[in-house]
Amino acid sequence: MKLAHLVAQYAAFRKNLGEDFESATRVLQSFSRSMGAEADIAGVQADRVRAFLDGRGPLTRYWHTKHTILRGFYRYALSRGHIAVSPLPVIIPREPERFVAYIYSHDELQRLLDGTSGYQKQRIHMEPHTFRTILLALYGAALRVSECLSLTLADVDVRQSVLTIRDTKFYKSRLVPLGSDLNDAMLRYAKRRKGPATHRKRTLRSSSPSSANGCRSAFFSGHFGDFANKRASTR
């Protein structure tokens, strides 16, 4: 049986069980493409499977994510008689150490916030007051960068002091309460936004394009770049 056909069959099987299998499907499709459009499931060699797992860079936790997905796929193939032996490696490398977060002190946080007024705005294309509000929301509401950048003005309810985070990880939404200081900061930011109040779908960020990479670039640039880089290097 063609590998690509079995991948499609397996993905449909998992989705019919009610699973959100989209990201795993993309990994399997990538695996199928790397083996070749005409590859047969029984003809996939162990060394090519290992090459797919290893990728081109250093070992990361993504290696084990891919391995787990392929393990489920090959169990499916074995149970239905498409192969006699799994080509997955027997020896599994040790997972790399987990990321250890650096906890900023109040003084360090204040220095970061103060630095937003002087970073290289022309290169990052983000207003200083926008970047300051993003940092406050990330810290005060414990948001992911993508969640913060996806906020619209309609998601910020300053009267009830709550944020609505929509379609986030695992396609769920949630309500995040705001402390009084962060709520005041969001209110000040909303008042600075230009344009009529009816533009409820405008995002929290400025009108110019922004992204998670843009935020990271802003974080490690400008007058507070040296400080931010120094702190990050200790994590």
Image (spheres, rainbow, N blue to C red):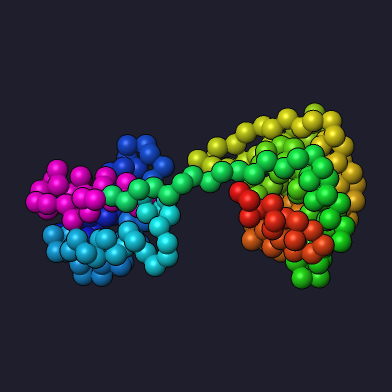
68 inside magenta stretch: yes
Kindly tell me whether residue 232 is visible in this rendering: yes
Image quarter of the N terminus: bottom left
Indicate the quadrant where residue 159 lies. top right
Could you tell whether 171 is left or right of 157 in the image? Answer: left
| Residue in the image at 32% along x and 46% along y | 68
Rendered view: 159 above or below 28: above
Tell me which segment is drawn in magenta. 65-91
Q: Position of residue 192 (x, y in %)?
A: 90, 51
Position of 172 with respect to 33 (left or right) is right
225 shown above or below 155: below
Q: Classify residue 141 by image quadrant.
A: top right
Q: Residue at x 81, y 37 (%)?
A: 182
Q: Position of residue 208 (x, y in %)?
A: 76, 64
In percent of width and height, residue 178 lies at 77, 32
**What is the count of numbered marks?**
0
At x 74% / y 52%, what residue is drawn?
203
Asked if residue 153 lies in the magenta stretch, the reply is no
Which residue is at 20% across, 45% downward? Answer: 75
- Say if 17 sits above or below 218 in the image: above
Position of residue 155 measured from the top left corner of the image (x, y, whole percent): 73, 41
**Residue 154 visible in the displayed image:** no
